[in-house]
Image: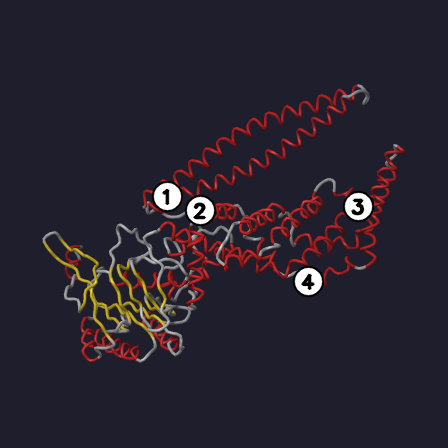
Amino acid sequence: MSEQLMDTYRQRAEGFRSEKESLTRTLYYNSILRLICFIFFGWFLYTSFQKRFQGLEIGYAVLGLIAFLLFVIRASAIRKKTELLAQLININENEINLLNGKDSFLDDGSFFKTEKGFTADLTVFGKRSLFHTLNRAGSVSGKRSLSRQLANPSLDPATIQHYQSCIKELAGKITFRQSLLAHTLLLKEEEALAQLQSPLLQEHFSFVQKAPWLQLSRVWPIAGGFVIGYSVYKNSFSYVLALTLLGLLVLSPVFKKISQLYNHISKRGYLFTQYATCFQLIRNETMEHPYLLQKQQTIADAEEAFRKLARLMGVFDLRLSMLSFFINGLFLSDLLCAQAYLRWNKQYQPFIQSWFDTMGEIEALNSLATFHSNHPGFVFPEITEESLLIKATALGHPLMRENAAIVNDASIGSPAALHIITGSNMSGKSTFLRTVGLNIILAQTGAPVFAKKFLFKPVRLLTSFHHIDSLEESTSYFYAELKCLQEIIHSLNDPQPALVLLDEVMRGTNSKDKHDGTALLIRNLLDKHCLALIATHDTELGILSATHPAGIENHCFESEISANGLTFDFKMRDGVAQSKNATYLMRQMGIV
């Protein structure tokens, strides 16, 4: 199946590359024709001047200018199409790189990293993280939506099942998924989005909507048109200059306020057009699942709204050109644009946040759908609302290549809710904890998991893996760990069930203290409504299963020292680990 996927992405990349090369040639010929038209225009304009505008030369000059402008517009459209094709080529080459085990060029989510909690312990964000593997979002909204879903996996079975159905549907829409990603990658919104989404205080600019200014904005442009026509008729432009100066004088009391309004959306016409295109893609795609149809309905007016705003900005931005002196004086252009934007803002501002949230959610679903498409061997989990359990067959680490990952069966909560996992260094204990945790995150976002079968009840994730000293808080490594364990125990008072993953707890104290403290912690966890996996080197903790046979199971990972060296099979076994390798490794490294 991997080769089939590779072929699909190669064919798409080659198709887009061929189209891009064709457009590049077209752009070259367009440039030549544009130059010819400009020369044509210049020649006949010059000839027309020589003949004092007698004859047809001025008409030819106008035709040449029109043709030149049409070629300019066409060149702009070709460049935009070329940029889109370049992104589509990158997207498909990126999929090939990921299938070959290389890193994605897309955002790795480092911005969302935290110093503690399960997202830090399980490497949910950052380079080569779960986010980095999943992410197919180009917009700020899309990346935020995906990060929220990974940091707060759903606990509602109905929501998870809705997402599973949506992901299955979107997985078959590769053209839609890649087109939306390509268009969002073309967004240059990092600074603009927050400003666009922030509410505008209408009352701060209400003066331009009062009756005198409204009447003036209706009458003045008519007067400006009349004066221009009259001046042409009289062949005297003094009236135009007089009205221009008067218009600028009329605008002067409100010019500063209008500039503040302009700065709220200035010079972003291309961005608004690009947003409109993204909303158009989502709105026009044929969807079947009710949840997706509901999302389409949410953004029903978004495309039209942003196209209106883009057209408005095309006019408003003229205030930065050399023409601003005349268009403001003759037509009060700034006033008209300010009033138009206030009307737009009043009509659409209440919906902007929900529009972007919806687009972000679709991007997040696209990310998970691409993951499903790239891993057809992964399964969608079954959800149980009765017993608290996680039961998996052939469970593997979802960030590892399928043909290289070692898989293990797991049955937590059926019957024992707490598993003590022992093993020597590097044998696979921590990796197994991450395997379970990452697959739970995937399962609760509606995505498929690396397993042949997976049955579970949604749980909160509580982890304790890594801790660091804090000079600012004057806390040692050991105290930082105790604070984390305290938070976990307090959190377990919540009636919502949890999965607790603990990796080598109490490592900051002496062996006897560590053993006694860990044993007490385990007994405390047995009284909580949770499942727990505890990885440890302390094999003596295995005796706890004798006193709590219904609540605790022992599992282990072993290593083997032979003439060929130290080997691991990373297979989980029942019982307590027997092998040790610390002394062997120290000798091999010349430490002892």
Q: Where is residue 579 shown, x and y percent of the image? A: 15, 64
Q: Where is residue 340 shown, x and y percent of the image? A: 72, 53
Q: Amino acid at mark 4?
A: Leu
Q: CA distance from mark 1 to mark 4?
A: 48 Å
Q: CA distance from mark 3 to mark 1?
A: 56 Å
Q: CA distance from mark 2 to mark 3?
A: 49 Å
Q: Amino acid at mark 3?
A: Phe
Q: Where is residue 167 shown, x and y percent of the image? A: 43, 55
Q: Which mark lies nearer to you, 4 or 2?
A: 2
Q: Amino acid at mark 2?
A: Ile
Q: Which mark lies nearer to you, 1 or 4?
A: 1
Q: CA distance from mark 4 to mark 2?
A: 42 Å
Q: Which residue is mark 2?
A: 174
Q: Which residue is mark 3?
A: 331
- Which residue is pictured at 12% across the width and 51% down the height? 564
Q: Quick one: label 2 or label 1, which is nearer the N terminus?
A: 1
Labels 2 & 3 near each other (Cβ < 8 A):
no
Q: Dot 2: what SS?
A: helix
Q: Dot 1: what SS?
A: helix
Q: Which mark lies nearer to you, 2 or 1?
A: 2
Q: Amino acid at mark 1?
A: Ile
Q: CA distance from mark 4 to mark 3?
A: 26 Å
Q: Dot 3: what SS?
A: helix
Which numbered dot is residue 201?
Answer: 4
Q: Is residue 434 left or right of residue 201?
A: left
Neighbour tally class for label 1: few under 14, some 14-19, many 20 plus, Cα within 10 Å: many
Q: Quick one: label 4 or label 2, which is nearer the N terminus?
A: 2
- Which residue is pictured at 55% across the width and 36% down the height? 79
Labels 1 & 4 near each other (Cβ < 8 A):
no
